[in-house]
Structures are given as structure tokens and as C-alpha cells.
Amino acid sequence: MEDNSSCSSMVTGVCQASFLQRTLERLSSTQCLKLSREEAAPVAVIALQRYLSEGQQEQIDTFNYDVTVTDGVWRAKCFVHPSLNQLVHTNTLRTGADISITQCSYVYNERRLGHGYICIEKLTCGAGRSAVLPRVKDVTSLPMLVKHGMERSVVLLSDVPLQVSRKHYLSLWNNDDPEGEIWTSGSPSSDTVLDVSKITLLCSLESAFKNTWKSLPLLVKIIHKSRLRYYGKFGLKIDYPYQAYFEVADQSGTMSLVLWNELCPEFYQLLNVGTVLYLQNYTLKQSYSNRSHPQMDHHRMKSFNSVEICLNPRNPASLITVVSPKCVLPQWGLPEVSYHFTTRSELENLSNNAACDVIGLVTFVGRVERVKSKGNKGPEKYWTYRWIHAVDGTSDHPFILEVFSSSQPEIFGRICPMTYLVCTQMRVCQVEGSLPYLTSSCETETFITGHHKGQPYVSDPKVKSFIQWTKTLKDNVVLQKTAVGGHYCYPHPPQKCGQSMADASAPAPLVSVADLKSELETLQYREHKKLAIQGQITAVRYMKSPKTPQSRVAEDKEGPDVSTAASEEAAADTHIDPSTTEQTLLASLTSASAEKISPSRRKRRIQTREAAQTFLNRGCVSAKRRTRHKNTEGGEGEESDSESEAQDVDCHLPLQNQNQDSDVLSWESSGWMKQRQEVSEHLCQGGLYQESLSRRFTFDERDVLLQRGNLQPVRWTPEQTTDTIPPAACPGYYQVTILGINKQIAVDAAYFPVVSSDEPRAVGLPQHPHGNTMLSCLSLGFLCPLSDTANRGEATLPEPEEVLVTAGELEDMHVVCILDLCHLGGDEVEVLVNKVYRVTEVSLD
């Protein structure tokens, strides 16, 4: 290393000229460095890591973020100033993308010698693919940049936070998943001969707890395992505030065991159902009454619930011996692990909240979403979950599974169609008006193909029966019934809502439109919320394609407030020229609308438009045609819109392919033209996006589909695919404008009805026949009758004109709209109409 350089590296070599090197050198002579756009060369984000902040509760955020960037020559681990945290919350600052650092400083740790780091104070985020990463063959081989004299900071460049009072990182999007190198994943089981002559049984511990007793060794088998619990908070002087529950058993019965603090990173991933443990130096304490417990009636063993076994890292330090399976002797009398597998045909017979285990062949996997946990007293906490359909051959209906993260990220992120899925300790949810579904409990574990070997359930009779059934299937037939991604929400709202929506804990609490605006502004990446608002539907437009970057530019939306310091710059970088992929997407979707129409369908469309014209004359329905013609010399197109049409077309419509004809159909209430001039705000950011749509699964596209369905990864790896896939098919959707009941704020929401029984959203949907009026479609969620791809007849579904021609009945109607909100990342916020009630159908308290 060069002695006269202000930087050094973790490898021997010449300090090459680079943006990061020049920046660090300039920080030697100034406290705060501001960079012009010309100076701020792009760097790629290759890691983004989260941890509990060490400040006070009044701080901007409860978590801090470290970001590792590269300019292709060096790597640098930097601290993200808390004012930029919103960029992480919205997945605007993300791994695999480029950023430009426009202001930074160098921070010395005043309580330790030789520790310091770059703090990024302002930045702009690039959109699209990185321009830096394609030039890098091996990111891990690039040297780490360290300020001269700060070589002690090298330790911070490993898997340790820059804020040195914290010892470990958290998973980026939840607190449940193990994250980082500290989590042992090996298998250090012991082959040593154990002295089991002086062990004690679980049945003796309850009485021993009340008296003076000597801790004798325990020999137990794990029969249930819970997810991790992180209980870190401000002021807690514990380096690894983790806890995990296990249910263990011996020949006398079962008891809870608790793994505490730094023993969790060391042992949690080694202790699995079926593992045999030899325990010494444990302690006993009274059981915590408010925690959940697995249902274990099927084990037919006595449960000792008054005390629980505690394994602590100190005072005293517990000794945990993982016994090798080949050393487990039958004479120890340890019970076999028992399961309670339920087939799909048996599910309706189970009571609400009953526990069961299931196995099925996955046919649908939804995108991973997040929901804020209720009643959490610690730092803000999100659960991550996804919806899954799985079939087992015993019913025409699939299992509908709401699977939450179970501290098994290597499995949770790899669930895809055509895999065998096992979920243990799922809880039954019986819902009026919908098919029953299963949701995770704290003790749920999931296993997929590639992880079944050696699991105790493989010998279960129902598992063996399921495997035999799958041997009768043909992959190409099953693949035709698969789907991945897209908007999915279950259970479906009841046809008549009898419960109070005023309760904040209701599935869809009633909020004011002003509160809805606040919810939209504070929504975080992939966070899902369901809310209800009162108002009137004042306009409905039929749109022929999901939103694209072009349409968002056309909407002339205000850029997102990405940070207090860099909003203007970030907003400028967010709206870039569309990529080739996006242009292809737009062309394919608009060209789909120009498909040949059979004579009978064409005749029916003409008749519908004639009917619509009568409403147009009364100001109820407008069918507008915008046509752009190329001139014969190949120059710019000329608009042929009349002045009246140009005034009538809403400026927020998505861009159409300018080389093709396209219809924009809409209905407006008679008073909307005047009312829209009087509203104080019109919230237009919601809509339908490509990510809102599910698509068929294929093995060739497996990796890219998995990547799109999962959350943004903590670290960039070369394996992250940049492949493109064709856009999901979408005939169109309706954009619904809802005016708040006090006529001060309006909001646009997308509505795309279920049109086929093959769609994942059709499963469990109450399919009552209806007349395909605009109101009945919004109320019931589907077009009638649902088509079947195997036997799709011609002209079975109504055209958009036929639906819109009935929209006049919405005039001045007081309605309650159930909305699904989901932040898709960046500036994309999905706002979808789930269901519309007439106010007379809802009990309002």
C-alpha cells in the first residue's frame, strides 16, 4: 500500500484512481463535502443493512442503515444519514441500483481510537439497471476503502454495524429472519458417549421448581420449534436480544424450552424438530402465560405447563450438546415426533382456530408483502407473508394458505409452483361467505422440495398417500393451472357487512379520505393495508393497459419527497427515459387491443356504442376516440382530436401507442365537472401496474419470477437475474374516481374484475349471478359468468361499453369503498377497489 495515500486496502496493491478514492481524499481536508452533478459519478449499491439505532426515541427513525457501494475499483461501507431513511422505506435506495452521492462527511468515533466512516448526507437514486455492476467481474474481490490511520475500521467492514454499540444486523424487511454471518448453520452434533445414568425427567421439574434442587442433566427431543423473536429496544443493554421457544419431550411428557440471547445465533439453526439434546446448567422459571402454544393433543403426552426450561449464555452458562442421530439409543425412551396432517377434503370439518399440518402441490404463489404487526410495543415491526394455493387431489378446491415468515428465509423465498410444500401447525380460519383458509402460527414451519429429506413427517401415511397421487400427474397439465405474483387478498369481503367498520382493528377500518391520504404517504415498501372510505363514485374510465413509466410521466405527478435534503435531485432521477423493455411492454399491451374481432362481437360492440350514445347526449357516458396519424413522409404524427374532445379527455390517462387507434371509454356524473374544480386535492397516484397482475409459471422463467415475487435482497449477487420476461396479459381495467363524502378530496383507484375461473383471485369467490352492471361488478368483483379457458365460448363476457353504459345508476349514490393499498417500491403505489357497498348495506357505528 502507498504510504502517502489517504486510503488503504484490505489487500496489497496500488491504490487506483476512482471516485470513491478521490472523495475520501477530499474529506481529509474538509468536514463536509458537497459535490456537483458533474463530480458525483455513479456508484452501485451492493449491500444495504439495517440495525437498531443507538439514539433516543425522539430520533427520526428507530433503525439505522449501512450501505456498501462500489465504483468498480473500490468498495466502501458508508453510513446512511437518518434523513435519507425514507429512500430505504420506499425501496428507492436499493441493492443492484446506482446512486450519485452529492454530499457526504467523515465521522470519527470519539469513544474509540481508529474508527471512522463516510456518512452519506445527500444522494440521488438512479432508476433502471446499474451502469457500474456490468463492468465488475467479482465484487467480493474489490478492495475495501479505509481512511489512512483508520485501519481499525477494517473490523467494521465485515458483518458488524458502523455504529459500534450494535453487534449485529437485522433482516432488512422484518425482525424474524436470521441475518448475517453470526448465525451458525452447520451441524456440530456430538458423537461422544453420554452419561445418561443421572438424568432427570421433565415430570420432576415442576415439583423441583418449588424447592431447592440441583440441576441434573436432561435428555430430550425437540417436537416443535417457534420462529425467532427479536425484543431489542432503546436502552436495552443486551447485545443479542433474541428469544426462541421449543417444545421438548421425554418419556414422561412435554415442556417448553427457551433459548436466550447470543445462544440464538449459535444454536437456533442447529436445533430442529427431531433433534435430541443433552442439557446441563439450565434454569427453570415460571411459564409466560401470554405467549402462544402449539396444539399437541395428537401427541397424546402429558404437558407440563407451569414452568419452562431456560438456556442462558451466562449466570449460569448452559451446556448444550446436540446428539448425533446415530448415537440416539432406543432404551432412552424418547417419543417419536407426531403430526396431524389434514387433507383438503377434511378441512371444512375442522373448527375455527384448530391446528393442522398440510402437504400439497403448489399451484399459485403470491408476491411477498408486509403488514405492520398489531399491539407491538417495541420498535416498529413488520410481518412478511405471502399467499399460496396448494392441491392434494382430495378436493376440487386448493388449500388457501396465508404463510408468514417462519425464520426460514432460505425456504420462504424459494416457494414456487410445482414444488411440494409442507406447512406445520397452521390454524384454521372459517370465514362466512368464503372458503376456509389456513394461516401461520408462531410455531409454523415450512418445507419445500429439496428440504424434505430427513424430516420426521416423511413416514406419515398421509404424506405417503400424497406422494403416490402426485405420481399420477403430468407436469405440462399442472403447469397450465399455475400462477405467480400479482394482487391477491383473502378472504373476500362479505356480501353484506354487518360488523362495525369504525373499529380500528376491523379487517377494513373506516377512515376519512384525509386519513387515507396520510396512509398513502406513510406506506412503506410492499406494505399492504385494507381500508374503507365513504363517498360517491363520480367517474369511471376504462383503461387498456397497466401503468408504465410513460404513463406516470404523462400524469405529470409531483415527484416523491424522497428526502429532506435531496428531493428535487432524486425526483429528477426517478423519471428517466423508458427502457426498451418498457417500450415493448407498452406496445404489446396496446397492440393486444387491436386483435381481430369476430363479426358477432363487432356487431354487439356497435350496438352497445349506439346505446351508449343516448347516455352521452345526457352527459352520462362518453366514448372518446383519440387518433394519431403518421404523415406519408415519416415525420411527426398529427393529432386529429377536435377541440371539444381534447377538453373532455382527462390529462391523467395512460399514454397509448401513438401509431394505433385506441378507445378511451368513460362515464362521469352530471356534477363531477363542477365538483372537480372545487375539491382541495385529487389523489391520483394509485393504479394498476404490471406487478398487480399474476402470470403463468414456467420453469424457464423461474429465477426471474422468484426474484420479482420476493422482497429486495440485502446483498447484490451476480446470480441476480436481469433477464426480462413478456408483460402479463391484461385486457384492461377501470379507473374509478371516488369523491369523499364531504366533497373535499377525491381519490383514483383501479378496479380489474375477475374474468376467468382460472385466476387465483377466483378461488373462493362467491359467484352469485348478476347483470354485469357497473355497480354489481364493483360489488361482487367479477364479470358474469366467469369463463373457463378450456371451454371458452365466444362473446361470453360483456364489453367495457356494456358495463359502462349502466354506470348512470351510480349518480349521487352514497357508497362505502373497500380499498387495498400496497406500496410496490419507488413511486408506485397500488390502490385497488376490492368491493363497493351501498351505505345501506353496511352497519356504521
Image (cartoon, rainbow, N blue to C red):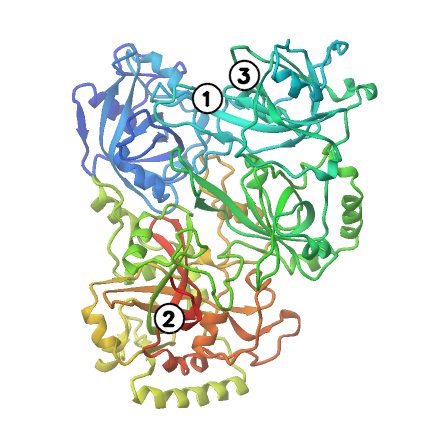
Residue that label 3 marks = 312
Sort mark 1 into few (<14), some (14-19) or many (20+) by Cα contacts within 10 Å: some
> Is 687 on the left or on the right of 472, as rendered?
left
The front one of 533 and 751 is 533
Q: Earlier in the sequence, mark 1 or mark 2?
A: 1
- In the image, residue 805 sits, relative to residue 530, either above or below, namely below
The x and y percentages for residue 221 are 71, 25
- In the image, residue 182 sits, relative to residue 559, either above or below, namely above
**Marks 1 and 2: which is nearer the front?**
2
Q: Are marks 1 and 2 in contact (CB under 8 Å)?
A: no
Residue 185 visible (yes or no): no
Q: Quadrant of the N terminus?
A: top left
Q: Residue furthest right?
A: 331
Label 2: which secondary element: strand
> Is 402 on the left or on the right of 544, as rendered?
right
C-alpha separation, residue under disc 3 versus residue under disc 1: 12 Å
C-alpha separation, residue under disc 1 versus residue under disc 2: 50 Å
Q: Which mark is residue 240?
A: 1
Residue that label 2 marks = 815
Sort mark 2 into few (<14), some (14-19) or many (20+) by Cα contacts within 10 Å: many
